Amino acid sequence: MKLLVVDDSLIMRRAILKYLEDYNFNVVGTATNGHSALELFAEHKPDIVTLDLTMPGLNGLTVLEQMLEIYKHSKIIIITALKDKMTGLEALQLGARGYVTKPFNEEKLKETFKVIIEELMQERSV
């Protein structure tokens, strides 16, 4: 499965990749802003994306919408420091498949990914 990690923090990108090593994802790229995220997304059409909401340039919700317009089959997981429940609800209504708040622990992230991977496997078996 192809994975794209989008976060303006190098520490956060590294942590996400470290926590997900066991899944043996094909990491198609990492991005630090919305514009480069959209370029990588359009090029690779990843199965799963982790997306921060607050980055330089484009707003994360705008990036989410544009990603799903490009390739609606990607599963996008929001990973953000924003604890505003309305923002989380809006992201889910726009099509995000998960919402994890920072700081997060490895178990929470893996639990979210387990659900997403199962969803992808079910879709592929149909």
Image: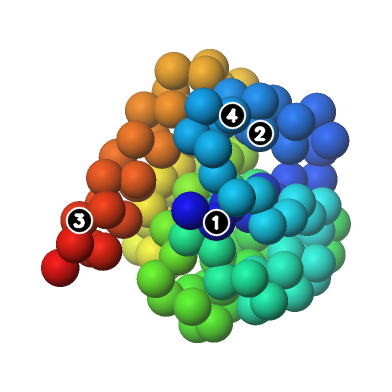
Question: Label 2, on which residue?
Answer: 17
**Labelled pair 4, 2 in contact (Cβ < 8 Å):** yes
Tag 3: amino acid: Gln
The x, y position of residue 126, in whole percent, is: 15, 68
In this image, 72 relative to 34: left or right?
A: left
Q: Which of marks 4 and 2 is in front?
A: 4
Tag 4: amino acid: Glu
Q: What element carries label 2?
A: helix
Disc with the residue nearer the chain's start (3 vs 4): 4
Question: Label 3, on which residue?
Answer: 122
Q: Can residue 117 be seen in this view?
A: yes
Snapshot quadrant of residue 42: bottom right
Tag 1: amino acid: Lys
Disc with the residue nearer the chain's start (4 vs 1): 1
Disc with the residue nearer the chain's start (3 vs 2): 2
The residue shown at (68%, 76%) is 43
Snapshot quadrant of residue 108: top left
Question: Label 1, on which residue?
Answer: 2
Q: Is mark 3 on a helix, strand or loop?
A: helix
Q: Residue 21 carries which label?
A: 4
Disc with the residue nearer the chain's start (1 vs 2): 1
In this image, 11 relative to 95: left or right?
A: right
Q: Distance between the residues labelled 4 and 1?
A: 13 Å
17 versus 5 height, above or below: above
The x, y position of residue 35, in whole percent, is: 79, 70
Q: Which of 113 and 88 is in front in this view?
A: 113
Q: Which of 36 and 126 is in front in this view?
A: 126
